Each structure stands twice: as C-alpha cells, then as structure tokens.
Image (cartoon, grey):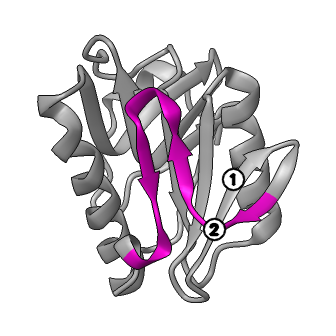
C-alpha cells in the first residue's frame, strides 16, 4: 500500500517509528540495550556542548532528505539554529548505531543518503564489536570521531564502558 508523505507525517506508530521511502513505510530494527545505551551516551555528549555552542541534539528525529524520502537518525546534531519539527536541511552530524538484526547493505545506503544530502559528519557505531566508522567515500574504521567545528574528539573509551 502506497502512503502519502502527508499521511506518514500524521501517523504515530504504536511500537517503533518507521522511515518513509517513495511511498513505502520501512520498518527499523528494534534497539536493544547496547544500542540504546550508545545512543544515550552520544546524545548526552552533544547535549553537554550546548553551553558553548548553539547546538541542538536530537534522538530518533525524522529528517526529510527529499520529497519522498524521510529517514530517522539515531542521533543528530544541528549547529546554528533550532531545527523545525521535520528538518529539511542537513544536521552537522548524523549518527547511526547498529542493531543486531541490521542489514549492512541497508545501513550503508542510509549513510550514503545522509552524505549526499550534505551532512558533514556521518558516523556509524557498532556497539557489539566496539568499533567506530565514518562515511565519506564509503565506510572507514576510525580510532575516534572528530568534529573540528566543535573542537570535539570522541574516543571509544568515552562511548563503550
């Protein structure tokens, strides 16, 4: 069944919010404890910078990348002005956190969509293997996440206890 963007944006789902791709509702993986804890730690890390920067941190926010594509970032941070309810401009940072049942091909596609939209820092966190990846021209494992605009460097020790 094809759903309009307007209908999708009016819908609240009883379990986990869904993404929207060309009229289709796309289910997301259910987060477990490692996913949720990683999401909370990263969200808190960015929220703590609010006293130094005009930074707006969001968890599980719908992002309108184009007319018929709305994705949900696990964590994102906007620099400058507060975003609207469904932002149509890219955040400074978009972070995806792997769940155990995620398909890597779908995750990579989502990361590439963020990159093509103009997100400057696109990250992937694997809480099970305790690895960090950036998405520039493909995925690359990194030793830490760096955001020069915020003078921020996040190491695995700060994310994984």
Can you give x and y, in whole percent of width and height, for residue 100 in the image?
Answer: 58, 84
Between label 1 and label 2, give the one nearer the viewer: 2
- Residue 150 is inside the magenta segment: yes
Residue at 17%, 46% (x, y): give it: 48
Residue at 46%, 52% (x, y): give it: 153
| In the displayed structure image, the side of residue 43 where residue 154 appears, left or right | right
Report the magenta residues as a range.
Answer: 140-157
- Residue 143 circle label: 2
Kindly indicate whether the residue at mark 2 contacts the one at mark 1 (C-beta within 8 angstroms).
no
Instruction: Judge by depth and name the residue closer to the eye, 20 or 87.
Output: 87
Instruction: Judge by depth and name the residue closer to the eye, 88 or 2.
Output: 88
Q: Secondary structure at mark 2?
A: loop
Can you give x and y, in whole percent of width and height, for residue 54 in the image?
Answer: 23, 20
Asked if 49 appears above or below 53 in the picture, the reply is below
Asked if 85 appears above or below 93 in the picture, the reply is above
Can you give x and y, in whole percent of width and height, for residue 55 in the image?
Answer: 27, 27
- Residue 134 circle label: 1
What is the quadrant of the N terminus in the image?
Answer: top right
Asked if one can make out residue 117 in the rendered structure from this viewpoint, the answer is yes
- Residue 148 is inside the magenta segment: yes
- Precedes in sequence: disc 1 or disc 2: 1
């Amino acid at each position: 069944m094809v759903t309009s963007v307007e209908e999708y944006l009016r819908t609240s789902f009883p379990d986990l919010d869904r993404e929207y791709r060309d009229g289709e509702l796309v289910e997301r993986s259910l987060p477990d404890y490692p996913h949720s804890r990683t999401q909370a730690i990263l969200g808190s890390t960015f929220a703590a910078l609010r006293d130094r920067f005009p930074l707006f941190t969001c968890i599980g926010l719908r992002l309108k990348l184009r007319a018929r594509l709305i994705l949900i970032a696990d964590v994102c941070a906007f620099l400058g002005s507060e975003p609207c309810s469904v932002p149509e401009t890219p955040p400074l940072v978009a972070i995806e956190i792997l769940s155990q049942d995620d398909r890597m091909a779908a995750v990579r596609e989502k990361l590439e969509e963020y990159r093509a939209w103009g997100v400057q820092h696109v990250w992937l966190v694997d809480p099970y293997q305790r690895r960090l990846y950036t998405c520039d021209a493909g995925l690359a494992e990194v030793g830490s996440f760096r955001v020069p605009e915020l003078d921020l460097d996040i190491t695995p020790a700060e994310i994984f206890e």
